[in-house]
Image (tube, helix red, strand yellow):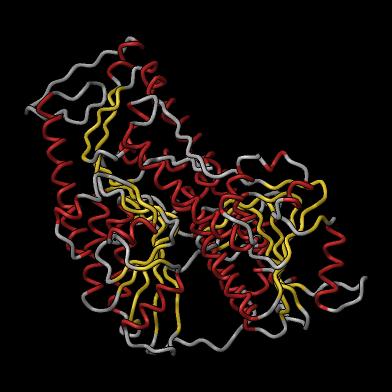
Amino acid sequence: MKDFLKIMLASALGFVIANILFSMIAMIFFFGAMGSFMGSMSTGEKFILQDNTVLNLRLDGPINERTPEEDPFFSLINSDLPSPIGLNDIVSAIRKAKNNDKIKGVYIDSRAMTASSATLAEIRHELVNFKESGKFIVSYADSYTQGGYWLASVADKVAINPQGMLDLHGLASVPTFYKDALDKLGIEMQIFKVGTYKSAVEPFTQNEMSKANREQVSSFLNDTWSFLKSDIAASRSVTTADIDMVANSLPALQSTDFLLSTNLVDTLLYETEMKNYLRSLIGIDKDAKIPSATVANMKSVTTKTVKKTDNTIGILYAQGNITSGTGSSNIQDKYLVDQIERLRKDKEIKAVVFRINSGGGSAYASEQIWKAITDLKAEKPVVVSMGDLAASGGYYIACNADKIVAQPTTLTGSIGIFGMIPSFAGTSKKLGISTDEVKTNEFSDFGNITRSLNDREKQHLQSMVERGYDLFLTRCAEGRNMPKDSLALYAEGRVWTGNQAKEIGLVDELGGIEKAIEIAAEMANLGKSFVVFEYPKLRSVLEELINPKKEELAAQTLKKYLGESYEMFMILKDIKEQDYIQARIPYELNIH
């Protein structure tokens, strides 16, 4: 009777909780829909570009590959946080501004943005191209981050608040190691790998970088820094030695007079004075409102009517951790393969630019995507455009494209594989927990994390990793049309910059998405007459809520609140779900 009552009580409680959750979801949907409706009512008027407009390039918050249209209701909830900006939207806004006579110049409003060097290189390239129009670019900030200043150095005039700060310190990688913490918890990470430079496992097995890892990190950091300082030096008419001298002087703690004397900035102005300077550039009265357009405003500024024609190039985005699954968050193999198949079957799409921004993940999932790209390539040109990262599994899915384009500061390569299985035998012992077993065959309990692997299990796992590495080498050698033994010299898990990768044949061209599109158009014989469409379609937050696959929204929420720790969480999740073999770059590069 007691058990029956417990069951009834549990059922009733479950029913009540389910109803509460359902009501909450219904309320969110209702108010979200109302917010969207009211937002659309209030913003129903299309933005109209005025004469003498300035493109206000406000750089605040994270810059992602692309972002969905923001729902007004959810933007109210997150009003205190800067919204992510899409790289594609920034690039599009600058290009439109260059060719629109109503826009007279660009105002770089540099704030606390976060973006990697390859993303910033894409934006900087567009700003350099913009200057060909003869229009002005000016920049202002209370405080410049290093990345923000790299962009700002393009400007005709760089201004800073008289009490402001400018950070220019070079690059450093500061990885975190967990070995001692795991030892205290009684957790043993059992490692199986191929590749001298495959350092992704080091945080779990060591307390410092290996000699090989230190070598590769030093190499790609110095190569990346050489591009940053060369760009800044050329734009500011100083030498690279001058830039190193300034970086070694800790300019963030120097007075703004120091910034003037070293030619990092042109003038010291308060923001009100900077706005008056802007007014003088566009020839309006001192008290007049400055006509301006944001990146979001520029979305509605059209150049010409775009219709899907026979000359169509598709840009397929693949961003995040590579895993097995059917969802749209990160790079889930079944979902992405389905997208690739749709592009293959679409007769109106003549070429595909495969935009990759990934440090890798599941070796199995990477192989499935590789096969889909191979099938696509058999029917139409495929050109890879590498973003910030296209390494390990990210390179695996890229290697068989017709052409590979990367930014000089892209991190790529890392051709290597590892397996990692935790053992909680020590933890169980510390807690006084014992287990027992009954099994029918020798390996029936394989994967039991309450014990360490035995010698035969370790041998089988190492053999599996070595087979995976050999297949990885084969895929890369065939894709890059290189002898396998030659390609092996640049493998071993080593990370290269895009610039270094071009020198050794892992990359064909240096550039961004625009370069990749040009190559794809040329390969498909499209001439100058073609249109570009992006895939897959991005869903808004509200669409995610009503999407039957609620795990996608959960993934986005986790990513938002866990920040940089999200990737580590997903890695441990993969291991837990038995995806033992990984082809990925080190977990946390921690490049500052």
- Give the image location of residue 472, x and y in percent: 20, 52
Can residue 452 be seen by looking at this rendering?
Answer: yes
Q: Where is residue 443, by image quadrant?
A: top left
Q: In the image, what residue occupies the spot 41% across and 41% down?
A: 218
Q: Residue furthest left?
A: 441
Q: Nearer the viewer, residue 380 or 388?
A: 388
Q: Nearer the viewer, residue 121 or 447?
A: 121
- Residue 532 appears in which quarter of the rendering? bottom left
Rendering coords of residue 310 (x, y %):
37, 89
* Residue 525 vs residue 261, the one in the foreground: 261
Tally of numbered tags:
0
Q: Is residue 452 left or right of residue 28?
A: left
- Expressed as whole percent of the image width and height from the top left, the position of residue 261 reads 75, 51
Q: Height in image: 229 above or below 572?
A: below
Which of these two is toward me, 387 or 311? 387
> Is 270 on the left-hand or right-hand side of 93?
right
Say above or below: 215 vs 476: above
* Quarter of the image with the C terminus in it: top right
User: Quadrant of the image for the N terminus?
Assistant: top left
Task: Give residue 24's position: percent from left, percent from top.
Answer: 59, 48
Q: Is residue 410 left or right of residue 421?
A: right
Asked whether residue 41 is in view, the answer is no
Give the residue drawn at x 34%, y 32%.
202
What residue is rendered at 21% in x and 70% in y? Answer: 375
Q: Is residue 485 above or below residue 191?
A: below
